[in-house]
Image (cartoon, rainbow, N blue to C red):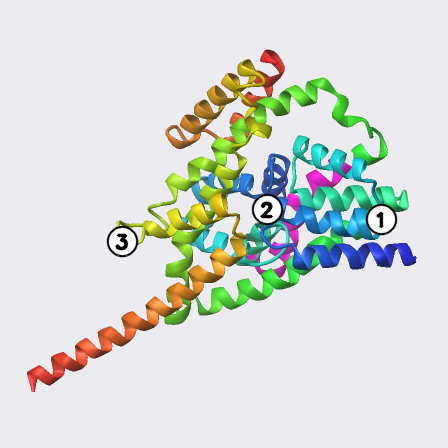
Amino acid sequence: MLLYLQLFYTFFKIGLFGFGGGYAMLSLIQGEVVVQHSWLTPQEFTDIVAISQMTPGPIGINVATYVGYTATQSVWGSITATFAVILPSFILMLTISRFFLKHRNHPIVEAIFSGLRPAVVGLIASAALLLMNTENFNSPNVDLYNFIISIILFIAVFIGTYKFKTNPILLILACAIIGIIVY
Amino acid sequence: MKIYWEFFTIFFKIGMFTIGGGYAMIPLIENEIVNKRQWISKEDFIDLLAISQSAPGVLAVNISIFIGFKLKKLPGAIVTTLGSVLPSFLIILAIAIFFQNFKEYTIVEKAFKGIRPGVVALIAAPTFNMTKSANINRYNCWIPIVSALLIWLLGFSPVWVILIAAFGGFIWGKYKNSKSKNDSNNNSQTQE
C-alpha cells in the first residue's frame, strides 16, 4: 500500500511541476524515478525513453505507465501512476478553461491573449526546430543514405500537409511503410 | 451518449498517432476537430494552445481536457482525456508485461526511423498555417520569431516565453487603452 501512495505522490508531483511538456519533464522524472526512488536503473530509464519514441503517446504518460508496472508488478500500479500524473493537469486545466471561457471578452483577457497568440506560433516553431536533430534525421557524416531519406520524407510530408491538407494519420502510416521498405 | 462515444473514438485515434510528444497532436487535432468537424474555430484553437502550454503537465492531455470541457463540460473533459491517454497506456502496459525487449524489434525501429522526420514536418507546417488565425502582421511578426529563437537557441523554457508574452500583451492593452482615452479627451477638448 505504501508503495502505491509513493507512486501516487511522486507522479502527482511530476504532473504538477512538469512545465513545458514532454522532454522538459524528463529531467524531473529522472530525478524522482531513478535517483530518489530507484524504481528504474539508469539503463532502464534510457530504454523507456527510447520506447517512448517508438510508441504513440506523450512521454510523461509512457513513463508513468511503465514505472507503475515495474515498481509494483501489477496493472494497478500503472493505473495509479498514470492517474496521478494526469490529475494536476485535470484540476488546473478545468479551472483555467472555466475562467477563460467565462471572461474571454474581458478587455484584460483580450489584451493578454493578443500577446500570447503570436508567441504560441513561435513556440510551435521552436518545437519543430528543436526536433530537427540527428536523432530524428540521422547525421549526414555518419550515414548519408539515411539522412537523405529523412530529408525527402520531411519535405514530402510538409508539402502533403501544408499544400494538400492530407490527413496526418495517412502521412504517418505512409512514412512507417516507407521506413520499413527503405531501411 | 452518442456524442461522447464520438469524442472517445476521435481522441483515441488522435492519441494513437500522437508520436513524439504533445506538439505532434496539433496537426491531428487541427484536421479532426477544426477542419473536419468544425467544433472549434481556428482562433479558439490558438487560444487553447496558449492555455494548454501555460499549465503544467502533459501538453497532449491539457489540450484534450480543454476541448472536452469546451464542448461538453466535465463529462466531455473526462471522455476526451480517457480517449487520448488510453492508447499509450495500453501499448506501454503490454510492453512492460510481455516484451521488455521491444526496442530490439527491427521492423518497429525501421518504421519509426521513417516516421520521425515526417512528424517533425507535421509540427513545422502549422507554424505557417497559423500565422493568419493568430493575427500575425508586419508589426507583431517579431514576437513569434523572437520567441522561437529564445527557446531554440538560448534554451529558454516555453513557460517564461508565455509569461512574458502574456504580461507584454497586458501592458500593451493598458497603454493602448489610456492612449485612446487621451485621444478622445483631446478630441472633446478641441471640439469645445
Q: CA distance from mark 3 to mark 1?
A: 52 Å
Check disc 3 and give the amino acid type.
Answer: Tyr
Check disc 2 and give the amino acid type.
Answer: Phe
- In the rendered image, the vertical position of residue A3 relative to residue A47, given as above or below: below
Q: Which mark is residue A156?
A: none
Q: CA distance from mark 3 to mark 2?
A: 39 Å
- Marks 3/2 in contact by CB < 8 Å: the verdict is no
First along the sequence among labels 3 and 2: 2
Q: Is residue B155 visible?
A: yes
Q: Read off the magenta span.
A: B72-93
Question: Could you say whether the residue bearing mark 1 is in a helix, strand or loop?
Answer: helix
The residue that label 3 is drawn on is B139
Residue A52: give x, y in percent of width and height.
Answer: 69, 36
Crowd rating for badge 1 (residues with CA inside 10 Å; few <14, some 14–19, many 20+): many
Crowd rating for badge 3 (residues with CA inside 10 Å; few <14, some 14–19, many 20+): few
Question: Could you say whether the residue bearing mark 2 is in a helix, strand or loop?
Answer: helix
- In the rendered image, the vertical position of residue B106 relative to residue B44, given as above or below: above
Left or right: residue B82 versus residue A130 is: right
The residue that label 2 is drawn on is B7
Question: Which chain's residue wears label 1?
Answer: A
